[in-house]
């Protein structure tokens, strides 16, 4: 199975691009969503996160996302420890998911694909880019957050220029029509290169 990594900084529009691939019949795995689901249902992850972050990590058995975000927000070491608990489980879950797919290739959408080294396990990588001002504007419309918090997240992510150098494809996500056109082109290119 051909695995195509899809990544981009916060607010770049990865979800929009993922949906465009889904519309073409390509199965899409959203690693962030799966990580949250595993953090909610895996007893092992729950136990380890409580050991790492304290009892407040879960409230009434459910993930206390605001509390966790606050703990790891400015603590890179803590973030890395949390990722070391969650990422291997997500990787195994993805491997099982891939086996159930019947398409020529799948998309694996990961916000930190380069930062966590996951790009090395992909056959192709697509990076979604957009101007910083537009990205901040999108996130402010989408989430209850502040420009400072968005900038702090951006600081923890690689610069677009570094991602672009290691990518097979780059989608400039400014207008939805242009983005869909770029997705269709990439889809054609990837399917053309797959040997059946």
Image: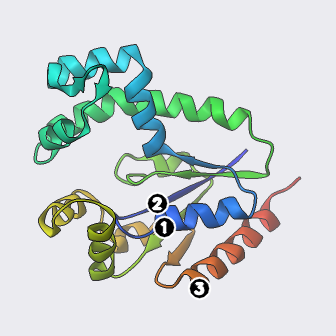
The residue labelled by disc 3 is: 178
> According to the image, label 2 marks what residue?
7
Q: Upstream in the sequence, badge 2 or badge 3?
A: 2
How is the rendered protein coloured? rainbow
Q: Nearer the viewer, mark 2 or mark 3?
A: 3
Foreground: disc 1 or disc 3? 3
Q: Nearer the viewer, residue 164 or 65?
A: 65
Q: Quadrant of residue 160?
A: bottom left
Q: Earlier in the sequence, mark 2 or mark 1?
A: 2
Label pair 2/1, CB-CB below 8 angstroms: yes
Q: CA distance from mark 2 to mark 3?
A: 18 Å
Q: Residues within 10 Å of mark 1 (few under 14, many from 20)?
A: many
Can you give x and y, in whole percent of width and height, for residue 37 in the image?
A: 45, 32
Is label 2 in a helix, a strand or a loop? strand
Whichever of labels 1 and 3 marks the residue nearer the N terminus, that label is 1
Task: Classify mark 3: residues with Cα within 10 Å, few (<14), some (14-19) or many (20+).
Answer: few
SS at badge 3:
helix
Quadrant assignment for the N terminus: top right
Identified at 26% across, 69% down, the residue is 140
Find the distance from the CA under tag 1 to the CA under tag 3.
15 Å
Quarter where residue 156 is shown: bottom left
Residue drawn at point x = 50 percent, y = 33 percent: 91
In the figure, 173 relative to 95: above or below? below
Residue 16 location, x and y as percent?
A: 53, 67
Q: Is residue 80 above or below residue 110?
A: above
> Could you say whether the residue bearing mark 1 is in a helix, strand or loop?
strand
Choose top left, top right, bottom left or bottom right for residue 68: top left
* Horizontal side of residue 180 vs 134, given as left or right: right
The residue tagged 1 is 127
Kindly identify the residue that appears in the image at 37 percent across and 28 percent down: 39
Q: Is residue 5 left or right of residue 185?
A: left
- Rounded to the nearest angstrom, the CA distance separating label 2 from label 1 is 5 Å
């Amino acid at each position: 199975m051909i695995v195509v990594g899809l990544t981009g900084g916060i607010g770049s529009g990865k979800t929009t691009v993922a949906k465009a691939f889904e519309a073409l019949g390509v199965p899409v795995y959203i690693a962030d969503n799966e990580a949250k689901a595993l953090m909610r249902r895996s007893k092992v992850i729950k136990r380890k996160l409580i050991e790492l972050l304290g009892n407040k990590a879960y409230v009434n058995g459910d993930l206390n996302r605001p509390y966790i975000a606050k703990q790891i927000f400015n603590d890179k070491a803590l973030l890395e420890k949390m990722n070391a608990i969650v990422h291997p489980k997500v990787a195994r879950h993805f491997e099982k998911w891939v086996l159930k797919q019947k398409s020529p290739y799948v998309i694996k959408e990961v916000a930190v694909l380069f930062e966590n080294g996951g790009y090395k396990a992909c056959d192709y990588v697509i990076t979604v880019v957009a101007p910083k001002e537009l990205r901040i504007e999108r996130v402010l419309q989408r989430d209850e957050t502040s420009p400072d918090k968005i900038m702090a997240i951006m600081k923890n992510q690689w610069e677009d220029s570094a991602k672009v150098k290691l990518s097979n494809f780059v989608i400039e996500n400014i207008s939805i029509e242009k983005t869909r056109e770029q997705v269709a082109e990439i889809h054609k290119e990837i399917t053309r290169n797959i040997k059946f």
